[in-house]
Image (spheres, rainbow, N blue to C red):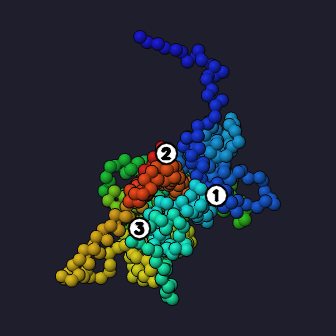
Amino acid sequence: MIRYTSDKQLSLAEFDWPFQTALDENNRWVKLSQVVPWEELAESYYQAFTSQRGRPTKDARLVIGAVIIKHKLCLSDRETVAQIQENPYLQYFVGLPGYQMEPPFAPSLFVEIRKRMGATLFDDFHAAVVERIEKGPSGSKKWKDKANPADNDKAAEKAASTPEQMSGDELSALPESEEPTEPEAASEETEAPERQGKLILDATVAPQAIRYPTDLSLLNEARELTEKIIDHLYPYTDLKAKPRTYRQKARKAYLAIAKQKRPAAKVRRKGIKQQLQYLRRNLKHIEGLLEHWPQGQPIPLPRWLLYRYWVIQHLYAQQWDMYRNRCHRCDDRIVSISQPYVRPIVRGKLDKPVEFGAKLSVSLNDEGIACVDEIRWDAFHEGQDLVSQVEAYKARHGDYPAVVLADPAYGSRANRRYLKQHGIRFGGKPLGRPKKETDENRDALKKEKAQRQADYRQRIPIEGKFGQGKKGYGLGYIEAKRADTSVAWINSIFLVMNLMVLLRIFFALDKFILTGRLWRLPGDKGLLWSQVSQALCWFRYSSSAGCRSAFDY
């Protein structure tokens, strides 16, 4: 039997509207809003504004919340505003007092927001997230002690055990053979502070959303833009005939090579020479047209087209030098006319030997919080950033890490010397020739080898963090059109991933520890701490290995 009801029989007024009831407290956006440190983020965001002049700004929670929604759901600027307009949970998340039908702001405001969000602002954001983890849901730093059995055991050993400091119940609970001893005299020499925590370092590239650059395609695009410039300038002159550009012949010559699957090297070189000649002719025509405007008088060109004209001149000079010298390398090579700051980064990978985008130096701590320490558009050696990254870790956590885990690129002699001076172990292979194995050092060498293998395995989470960002949050395809907005785009993705870690910790691990499930057997400490350690290991793995199931808790 077929039962069909026409859509025309239901009007909008007859549609069942379920929002008379309260919102669901277990909704994913409601949970996320409870763990985000809104006050600290707003304080950092308002530092760039003044209260004495200018138009009133949008609320900081509205702006920051919209950025989080955009990168959490991988939406465009227009779609993000539309989703906030239609979803009451998203409106609650961004701090609106009630449901409203109007959009919260224009989508073009996202561009201005990204311009304001510099690297210093995101450093404050990451520091606020780290402080939120340290304080915990109750606002006290004692909550982490319950989840760290090693620290509790050390504290118990250091605790005083004199009869005066013990209560009557504690004295009666001691065995008869065990008597409280007097505390030993404190040694005059103070021991060096014990390092805690680990710092994982690595670098990656955030590819920019540009067409794969080839010399032929770049020259063809430059030629077409110069033809548009000639079309714009000619009507403002008193010339009787438009300069000849041979655009149809140039287009056919380009397509004849571009349509070939694997053109030969001689064919490509011939096509590049043709496009260079057409481009040189067009640039000379433009110089002749610009003579009609005296120096200091504005040129009747759109700003975007004038900007590309400046870039095309540098592009032509680079391509002509490479063609004349029969090479394919030059300094500060332009691979995109609209984004000339993008540089080719040689990575040496099998599927992507060269990537086009910004190179990042990223550090990862124990809780899975990833911080972008350096973003540069030119290729650089990531090992030179180790010192600054370790100092940044100390600024965030108050102390140096116990171990630094990184690939061999970070293990230079200068870096190892710096880590040794600060009592930090480098988790990598030692320099020099391997030691000769003997009967005396065989066990020690096996332990060192096992330690190195364990260190290499502990570096896996940062690779998972890169995969999480590129596959799940759009880190592998940055769609911003400016250098500063691209940097803000990248930092926003890492901020969202850190908030997901914060959500997992508060709504899973903290709930697991504080609901009382661990205290049903108070006498069995081994079972108690084994459960806590298993929970810690699982949530740290899920926070850094690319899992995206945080909203399930």
Q: Mark 2 points at which residue?
A: 553
Left or right of 438 on screen, residue 146 = right
Viewer-proximal residue among 24 and 387? 24
Query: Does residue 527 show up?
Result: yes
Find the distance from the CA under tag 1 to the CA under tag 2: 24 Å
The structure residue drawn at horizontal position 43% and vertical position 12%, both measured from the top left corner, is: 2
Determine whether label 3 and label 2 are within 8 Å by CB. Answer: no
Label 2 is placed on what type of residue?
Answer: Tyr
Question: Does label 1 or label 3 sit earlier along the sequence?
Answer: 1
Where is residue 151 drawn, in percent x and y?
46, 67
Where is residue 392 drawn, in percent x and y?
54, 71
The structure residue drawn at horizontal position 47% and vertical position 60%, both measured from the top left corner, is: 147
Find the distance from the CA under tag 1 to the CA under tag 3: 53 Å
The structure residue drawn at horizontal position 63% and vertical position 52%, both measured from the top left corner, is: 64
Where is residue 130 drawn, in percent x and y?
55, 62
Left or right of 441 on screen, residue 174 = right
- Please rate how many residues cluster around mark 2, counting C-alpha atoms within 10 Å: few if below 14, some from 14 to 19, many from 20: some
Viewer-proximal residue among 78 and 431? 431
**Image mark for residue 41:** 1
Q: Quadrant of residue 48?
A: bottom right
Q: Which of marks 1 and 2 is in front?
A: 2
Left or right of 28 on screen, residue 463 = left
Element class at badge 2:
loop
Question: Does label 1 or label 2 sit earlier along the sequence?
Answer: 1
Query: Does residue 309 show up?
Result: no
In the displayed image of the protein, which residue is found farthest to the left? Answer: 439
Q: Name the residue under label 3.
A: 175
- Please rate how many residues cluster around mark 1, counting C-alpha atoms within 10 Å: few if below 14, some from 14 to 19, many from 20: many
Label 3 is placed on what type of residue?
Answer: Pro
